[in-house]
Image (cartoon, rainbow, N blue to C red):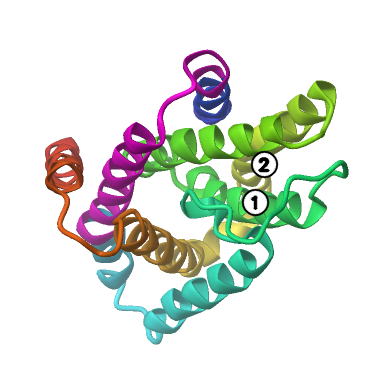
Amino acid sequence: MIYLALILSVLLGVFIASFFKPKTQALRLFLSFSGAYLLSITVLHLLPEVFETQQKNIGLFILLGIVLQTVLEYFSKGAEHGHMHGYEYTYSVPWLLFFSLGIHAFLEGMPLGLKGNSNLLWAIIIHKIPVTIILVVFLQNSNLQKTTIYIFVFLFALMSPLGSLFANKFPSINQYHTEITAIIIGIFLHISTAILFESSENHKFNSRKFIAIIIGFIVAFLSL
């Protein structure tokens, strides 16, 4: 069920991008909502979970997650939080983008394989939909063939389920569940704050964005 939900979230993003072609403003509001939801789940659920173990130096793994995501974004140009800074439309497959997004998706799927968590699953799903929409729009505006685009996106859709499956099939990894979750927390903190800060235009107050963020916070709180 987890694998299917993760794949369907990407397919839903493909469907929305291909048939509804959402406007930039609507997509930014969805990003703000998803960023707020992701941040809320991280702060209200994941952080207490790892710190209640009282494991020594767990904060270092959170910092490691932030550093790791910073490195990944050097290659993805910010695609994980809804931006494609620095990428030009091209005839060739953007392999650096694929590997960066793939590693990110694989890692975020691992905690689901170690310990099923509906809140984390929903956070990943809600995060994947707008990211997929932006990715598909970028690829469609490039000079790539449609077959190549769909293969690219399908492989991306498989990465989180593969991460979950990998963790599930190797029980020995379970002893590092807290450390892996802490790394994911760092990644989520980086992504969610980037979404909330970068979705503003000229850093001006935007009432619609503010409402989307508050709704994201409320929905996440009520889902706990």
Indicate whether 126 appears above or below 109. above
What range is drawn magenta here? 15-44
Outermost residue, top side: 19
Tell me if mark 2 has few (under 14), some (14-19) or many (20+) residues whose alpha carbon lies within 10 angstroms of its own: many
Could you tell me residue 178's position as x and y percent? 44, 66
Task: For marks 1 and 2, give the CA distance.
Answer: 9 Å
Q: Residue at x 40, y 86 (%)?
A: 57
Comparing 200 with 107, the one in front is 200
| Residue sitting at x 61%, y 59% | 173
Position in image of residue 163 (x %, y %):
64, 46
Who's the residue at 51% across and 41% down the image? 131
Query: Is the residue under label 2 in contact with that under label 1 (CB below 8 Å)?
Result: yes
Which residue in the protein does label 1 denote? 101
Which dot marks residue 145?
none
Q: Which residue is mark 2?
A: 159
For label 1, the SS is: helix
